[in-house]
Image: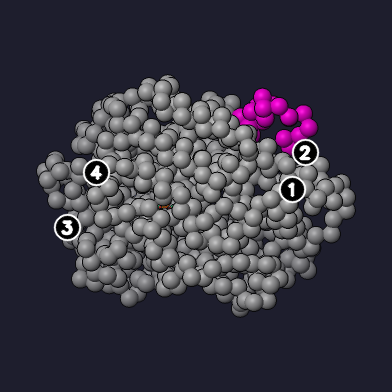
């Protein structure tokens, strides 16, 4: 690979732009900068290396949903979450060129337009209100459109599965692909029809920002080959040969950034301190225009904290000189979570679904599945990733009795002024900014949760006997902190530390278990296994939720939030770090609040938006 560098001897003396982290957002930025500014040099420093990134369900795996076989990634465990019986979160992160887009579940959906209304509500301030960079739906939609190429399925496949889509929401110039697979398991209609029988309307167009209903969701894979599409391909390997100004340094870790004069407000651009994974050598690389941190929500706060940019009390306790006191670095930590399963059942009547995952145990079926994946165009089971059908539903559409939950949020807003009133971690007590920002988030979420078109629940389905229930907008907040080992951050998920999250989980479980009473599932003799007939009262459901919640759906975010500094923010509307020159954060850590979607589409769109137009840089 022509521009892949392995060590400092292969680098230029200096670069115009240095990007820390060659993942989903980082490579999007590198691609767009190197394309728009051929006279400028760009270096990406990436911890991992170039690898073939298999899809989430590619040969040689036999069992749908079995793990393994993916490109390099690391698994972290969180601290015990007391509200969930001290269970710990398990979260994976990609450590490869392409980052998490090279190892993820390939579910490729966009958020709801109302997510961005919530962001702008929480951001309200002269800084954000007067900025030309708008992060409402209209401000980001063009970049969702630009970031992905969507290829419609053939007419035969569309008719076979009843696929719906609206291609007008994609520009089709990007090298990042989205498509609808030419294969589904035989029981896919169990979920669709039962949800429809519960009164949920089929949504036509999730890419439009209208995300209330049942949707077909594209997969991030090539429409012909069925192979994973990810930023390491579309934003590096596919373009590197034609970009002599775009270098990639692999197997190197960015430790920190250093302002040579010690003054982040007046020094122009920080230098980047890098560690070689192979030699252990530490050296500096100079940028003349800008440094962009894109290491993802778990590592970006670590780079900032090691640079002396973070909560002063914490940095001092770690004997790190404070360069900028920014309490928000590593705070506001959120992830999608939910009881797994929310509902699980068995059939008491014979079923004749076909094809089904068990068929992979039949040697002839398996051989045909492998052969089909290698045909052009690819066909068969291996063209389906994790799933591509989901229900997104708002609180008012799940229960008539949602006012008490909103009243609890209102009472937090009016009475909660201390960290214990608000169930927040100790760092929120450092100064008033984080609490102010959290209250602004609660106000935004109150509006969101009152809106019958703004989803609270996601339940995705591909096959089987389970409905998951993902809480899209938790109120609990955690923290990410460095430890002595740069690769082992301390993740304090604090899942469900705010008891309103438990109330929301209970609404979701109660709603989804109603599906078992629909004619579709009744005709199959479906009988609930979990939570089970002994779990009926709210107290019993609460115990079930506390004992069975998955704390991470692999969407850690929001740890360097785009909020005003006086609201605990880390970056402003142009994603520049507050109080620092020549330094931006561009990755999923800048989200103020979790979106109503899996997070890769948003990571790409953020990369596109910050580069528009790149000529301004
Ligand atoms: C297992 C898994 C399943 C997922 N499933 C889905 C899904 O189905 N759909 C979906 O939309 N989203 C999914 N996600 C989430 C989504 O992929 C991520 O939110 C998104 O890709 C994050 O993009 P990012 O640019 O913020 O970070 P990343 O893409 O993670 O990029 C960060 C990069 O920085 C590198 N790095 C970190 N620290 C350093 C350092 N100090 N120096 C140099 N390099 C460094 C990392 O190696 C990595 O390449 C999943 C994620 C995972 C891990």
State how far apart marks 1 and 2 are (Cα): 9 Å
Q: Specify whether residue 538 is painted magenta.
A: yes
Span shown in magenta: 530-549
Residue that badge 1 annotates: 465
x then y, percent, for residue 160: 71, 71
x then y, percent, for residue 273: 25, 48
Q: Residue at x 29, y 55 (%)?
A: 133
Whether the residues at callouts 4 and 3 have beta carbons within 8 Å, the answer is no
State how far apart marks 4 and 3 are (Cα): 30 Å
- The foreground one among 359 and 8 is 359
- Count of residue discs: 4
Whether the residues at callouts 4 and 1 have beta carbons within 8 Å, the answer is no
x then y, percent, for residue 579: 20, 42
Q: Which-is-in-front pick, marks 4 and 1?
A: 4
State how far apart marks 4 and 1 are (Cα): 51 Å
Residue that badge 3 annotates: 288
- Residue 263, can we see it? yes
Residue that badge 2 annotates: 529
State how far apart marks 2 and 3 are (Cα): 61 Å
State how far apart marks 2 and 4 are (Cα): 53 Å
Whether the residues at callouts 2 and 3 have beta carbons within 8 Å, the answer is no
Badge 4: residue crowd in 10 Å (few <14, some 14–19, many ≥20): few
State how far apart marks 1 and 3 are (Cα): 56 Å
């Amino acid at each position: 690979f022509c521009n892949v560098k392995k060590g400092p001897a292969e680098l230029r003396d200096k670069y115009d732009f240095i990007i820390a982290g060659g993942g989903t957002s980082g490579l999007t930025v590198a691609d767009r900068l190197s394309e728009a500014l051929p006279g400028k040099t760009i270096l990406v420093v990436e911890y991992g290396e170039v690898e073939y990134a298999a899809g989430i369900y590619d040969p040689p795996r036999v069992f749908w949903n079995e793990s393994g076989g993916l490109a390099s990634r690391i698994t972290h465990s969180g601290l015990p979450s007391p509200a969930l019986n001290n269970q710990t979160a398990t979260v994976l992160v990609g450590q490869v060129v392409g980052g998490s887009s090279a190892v993820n579940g390939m579910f490729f959906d966009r958020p709801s337009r109302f997510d961005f209304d919530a962001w702008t509500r929480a951001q309200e301030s002269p800084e954000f209100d007067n900025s030309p960079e708008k992060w409402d739906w209209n401000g980001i939609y063009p970049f969702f459109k630009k970031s992905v190429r969507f290829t419609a399925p053939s007419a035969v496949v569309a008719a076979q599965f009843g696929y719906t889509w609206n291609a007008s929401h994609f520009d089709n110039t990007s090298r990042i692909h989205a498509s609808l697979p030419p294969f589904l398991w035989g029981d896919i209609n169990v979920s669709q029809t039962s949800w429809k029988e519960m009164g949920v309307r089929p949504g036509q167009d999730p890419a439009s920002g209208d995300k209330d209903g049942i949707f077909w969701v594209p997969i991030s894979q090539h429409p012909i080959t069925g192979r994973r599409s990810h930023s390491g391909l579309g934003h590096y390997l596919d373009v590197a040969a034609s970009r002599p100004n775009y270098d990639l340094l692999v197997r190197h870790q960015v430790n920190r950034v250093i302002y040579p004069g010690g003054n982040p407000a007046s020094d122009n651009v920080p230098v980047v301190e890098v560690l070689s994974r192979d030699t252990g050598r530490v050296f500096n690389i100079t940028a003349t225009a800008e440094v962009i941190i894109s290491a993802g929500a778990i590592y970006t706060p670590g780079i900032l904290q090691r640079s002396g940019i973070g909560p002063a009390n914490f940095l001092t306790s770690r004997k790190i000189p404070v360069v900028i006191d920014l309490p928000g670095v590593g705070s506001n930590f959120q992830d999608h979570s939910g009881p797994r399963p929310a509902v699980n059942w068995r059939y008491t009547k014979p079923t004749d679904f076909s094809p089904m995952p068990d068929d992979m145990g039949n040697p002839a079926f398996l051989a045909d599945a492998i052969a089909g994946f290698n045909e052009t165009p690819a066909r068969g089971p291996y063209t389906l990733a994790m799933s591509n059908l989901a229900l997104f539903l708002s609180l008012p559409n799940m229960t008539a009795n949602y006012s008490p939950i909103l009243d609890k949020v209102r009472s937090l807003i009016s009475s909660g002024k201390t960290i214990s009133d608000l169930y927040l971690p100790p760092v929120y007590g450092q100064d008033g900014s984080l609490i102010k920002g959290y209250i602004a988030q609660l106000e935004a979420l109150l509006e969101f949760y009152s809106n019958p078109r703004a989803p609270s629940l996601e339940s995705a389905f591909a096959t089987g006997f389970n409905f998951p229930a993902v809480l899209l907008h938790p109120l609990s907040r955690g923290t990410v902190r460095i430890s002595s080992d740069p690769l082992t951050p301390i993740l304090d998920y604090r899942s469900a530390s705010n008891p309103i999250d438990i109330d929301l989980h209970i609404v979701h479980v109660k709603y989804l278990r109603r599906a078992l009473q629909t004619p579709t599932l009744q005709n199959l003799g479906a009988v609930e296994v979990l939570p089970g007939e002994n779990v009926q009262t709210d107290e019993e459901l609460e115990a079930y939720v506390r004992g069975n919640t998955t704390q991470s759906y692999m969407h850690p975010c929001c740890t360097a939030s785009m909020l005003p500094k006086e609201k605990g923010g880390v970056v402003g509307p142009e994603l520049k770090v507050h109080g620092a020159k020549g330094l931006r954060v561009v990755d999923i850590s800048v989200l103020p609040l979790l979106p109503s979607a899996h997070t890769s589409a948003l990571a790409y769109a953020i990369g596109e938006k910050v580069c528009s137009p790149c000529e301004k840089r």
